[in-house]
């Protein structure tokens, strides 16, 4: 049941904490699908057939960045949305911890270059505020130009990500910025439900896991 207010949500969360076993953890995770990227724009502009046949495997869309619209969309929906929710009773944000990259939380590994990451050294230069310490390989060892991840494979990876999230991130409230397919896989393996957020849309979930 979806709580009608932040107050009710906090009450339900407190009750969940009270009833959980000593070896259980509870996290409130806000899954945020990234804003519009150049690959999303191209797919919408040219349609699926042309995108697949002409553009999806080209270096033009390697690790696709956000479009100008995507940047503006993220800026307009970020702070204003948080303030609106705080006005409705959301607990105040006391601090924001460092941004951490967990590589298992990526889009489907397939032949599309938009899903292939850039070299680690380049990512560190472009995003100096992000903690990349959990990434060890300079080049992308997970993406393949010949194999597309199956549903079973991405769902297995989604479970692995959740295990790592609970093991490595101590905070109860977590925001996970990610891609559509991994968010879909996480909801499938945890709730058995389908979810399809739009670009820049947030879908929350409360998760419980054993500490060990």
Image (cartoon, rainbow, N blue to C red):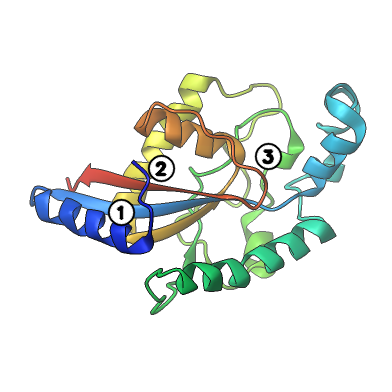
Disc ID at residue 9: none
Q: CA distance from mark 3 to mark 1?
A: 28 Å
Q: Which residue is mark 3?
A: 115
Residue 171 appears anywhere in the view? no
The image quadrant of residue 181 is top right
Q: Which mark is residue 161?
A: 2
Q: Which residue is mark 1?
A: 27
Q: Is residue 208 above or below residue 109?
A: below
Choose between 117 and 15: the one closer to the eye.
15
> Dot 3: within a 10 Å radius of its alpha carbon, few (fewer than 14), some, or many (20 or more) residues?
many
Question: Looking at the figure, which quarter contains the N terminus?
Answer: top left
x and y percentages locating residue 54 in the rendered image: 91, 28
Residue closest to the eye, 188 or 81: 81
Mark 2 element type: helix
Going 87% across and 28% down the picture, which residue do you hit?
47
In front of the other: 87 or 111: 87
Please, what secondary structure does the residue beneath circle 3 have?
helix
Give x and y (percent) for residue 204: 44, 49
Whole-Å distance between the Cαs marked 2 and 1?
A: 14 Å
In three-dimensional space, the C-alpha distance between marks 2 and 3, rounded to whole angstroms, equals: 17 Å
The residue that appears at 75% across and 37% down in the rendered structure is 113
Residue 27 image offset from top left, x and y in percent? 30, 54
First in sequence: mark 2 vs mark 1: 1
Relative vertical location of residue 92 with respect to residue 36 in this rendering, above or below: below
In this rendering, position of residue 159 left or right of residue 31 = left
Q: Is there a contact, CB below 8 Å, between mark 3 and mark 1? A: no
User: Outermost residue, front direction?
Assistant: 4
């Amino acid at each position: 049941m979806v709580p009608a207010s932040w107050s009710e949500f906090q009450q339900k969360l407190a009750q969940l904490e009270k009833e959980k076993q000593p070896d259980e953890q509870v996290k409130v995770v806000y899954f945020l699908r990234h804003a519009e990227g150049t690959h999303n724009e191209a797919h919408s502009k040219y349609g699926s057939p042309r995108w697949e046949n002409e553009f999806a495997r080209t270096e033009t869309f390697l690790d696709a960045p956000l479009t100008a619209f995507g940047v503006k969309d993220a800026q307009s929906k970020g702070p204003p949305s948080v303030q609106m929710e705080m006005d409705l009773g959301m607990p105040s944000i006391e601090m924001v911890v460092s941004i951490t990259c967990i590589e298992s939380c990526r889009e489907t590994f397939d032949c599309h270059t938009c899903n292939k990451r850039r070299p680690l050294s380049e990512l560190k230069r472009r995003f100096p505020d992000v903690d990349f310490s959990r990434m060890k390989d300079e080049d992308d060892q997970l993406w393949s130009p010949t194999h597309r991840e199956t549903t079973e494979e991405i769902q297995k990876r989604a479970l692995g990500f959740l295990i790592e999230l609970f093991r490595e991130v101590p905070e109860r409230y977590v925001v996970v910025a990610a891609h559509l397919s991994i968010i879909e896989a996480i909801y499938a393996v945890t709730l058995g439900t389908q979810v399809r957020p739009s670009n820049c849309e947030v879908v929350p979930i409360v998760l419980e896991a054993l500490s060990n």
